[in-house]
Image (spheres, rainbow, N blue to C red):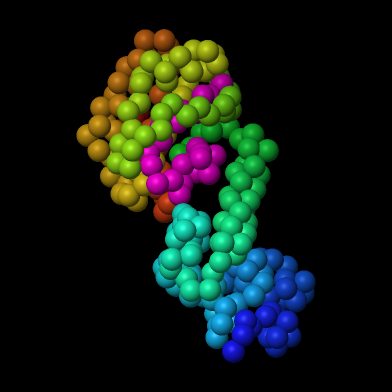
């Protein structure tokens, strides 16, 4: 049996036709992936292939998006470089579109949820740690976000002087510190606690407020402020 094409499926099962009739939001994750892949593999329809990849990643598109092209080639028989690249590009476009929609609104960053939504595209799905700082105006709008350091799998050093330089150079009234945990563990480390305190004390010296320190993983975030650890 050769590749099973979308056009060979029953009309009411074809993802493209379903999208045309009901819109993209009516499609399942597997059906959207099927449109991107276009064709299945030997003995497996394109929708079955998409279901298999999702099931292998516990149903999470975020986990699929973390895969490298090499991972697709090793783990999924029949998936070639072109299919893998096309899917990863589509997932990245979706992530960037969501972030762009939030930035276009230019919201006041007055809650951990809003801060997380703005910074999530920078820090999720990474296989290494990065430390970022969001610089806020007096009205609570984001002036810009700056990557302070990029490092290893479990830890990356952050120079407090660079954080404060970014804040002073951009005349920030307050800042929010961010970093990611590639392991998926949302529990702050002792080093995370020490960095929080160092940045808070340094910022206070320049009359700048550390509003929060947020740890980001692929499945959520930890906020020092929400946990009552920054008042």
Whether residue 43 sits left or right of residue 103 in the image: it is left
- The residue that appears at 52% across and 13% down in the rendered structure is 169
Is the C terminus in the top left, top right, bottom left or bottom right quadrant? top left
- The residue that appears at 36% across and 19% down in the rendered structure is 160
- The residue that appears at 75% across and 76% down in the rendered structure is 17
Q: Quadrant of residue 90?
A: bottom right
Residues 110 and 105: in front is 105
Picture coordinates of residue 197, whole percent (x, y): 29, 24
Extent of the magenta region? 114-137
Residues 122 and 106: in front is 122
> Farthest top residue?
206
Count of residue discs: 0
Picture coordinates of residue 104, whole percent (x, y): 68, 38
User: In the figure, 171 relative to 87: above or below?
Assistant: above
Picture coordinates of residue 125, whole percent (x, y): 45, 49
Residues 54 and 23: in front is 54
Picture coordinates of residue 111, whole percent (x, y): 48, 37
Residues 147 and 204: in front is 147
Q: Quadrant of residue 100?
A: top right
Whether residue 82 sits left or right of residue 151 in the image: it is right
């Amino acid at each position: 049996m050769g590749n099973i094409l979308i056009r060979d499926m029953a009309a009411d099962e074809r993802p493209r036709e379903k999208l045309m009739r009901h819109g993209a939001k009516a499609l399942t994750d597997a059906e959207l992936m099927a449109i991107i892949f276009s064709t299945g593999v030997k003995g497996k329809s394109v929708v079955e292939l998409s279901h298999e990849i999702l099931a292998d990643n516990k149903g999470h598109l975020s986990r699929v998006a973390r895969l490298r092209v090499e991972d697709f080639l090793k783990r999924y028989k029949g998936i070639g470089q072109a299919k893998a690249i096309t899917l990863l590009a589509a997932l990245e476009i979706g992530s960037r579109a969501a972030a762009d929609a939030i930035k276009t609104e230019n919201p006041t960053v007055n809650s951990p949820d809003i801060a997380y939504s703005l910074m999530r595209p920078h820090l999720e799905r990474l296989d290494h740690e990065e430390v970022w700082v969001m610089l806020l105006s007096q009205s609570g709008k984001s002036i810009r976000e700056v990557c302070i350091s990029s490092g290893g799998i479990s830890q990356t050093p952050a120079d407090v002087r660079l954080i404060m330089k970014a804040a002073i150079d951009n005349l920030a009234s307050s800042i929010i510190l961010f970093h990611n945990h590639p392991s998926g563990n949302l529990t702050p480390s002792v080093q995370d606690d020490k960095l929080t305190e160092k940045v808070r004390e340094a910022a206070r010296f320049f009359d700048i407020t550390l509003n929060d320190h947020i740890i980001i993983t692929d499945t959520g975030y930890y906020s020092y402020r929400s946990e009552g650890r920054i008042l």
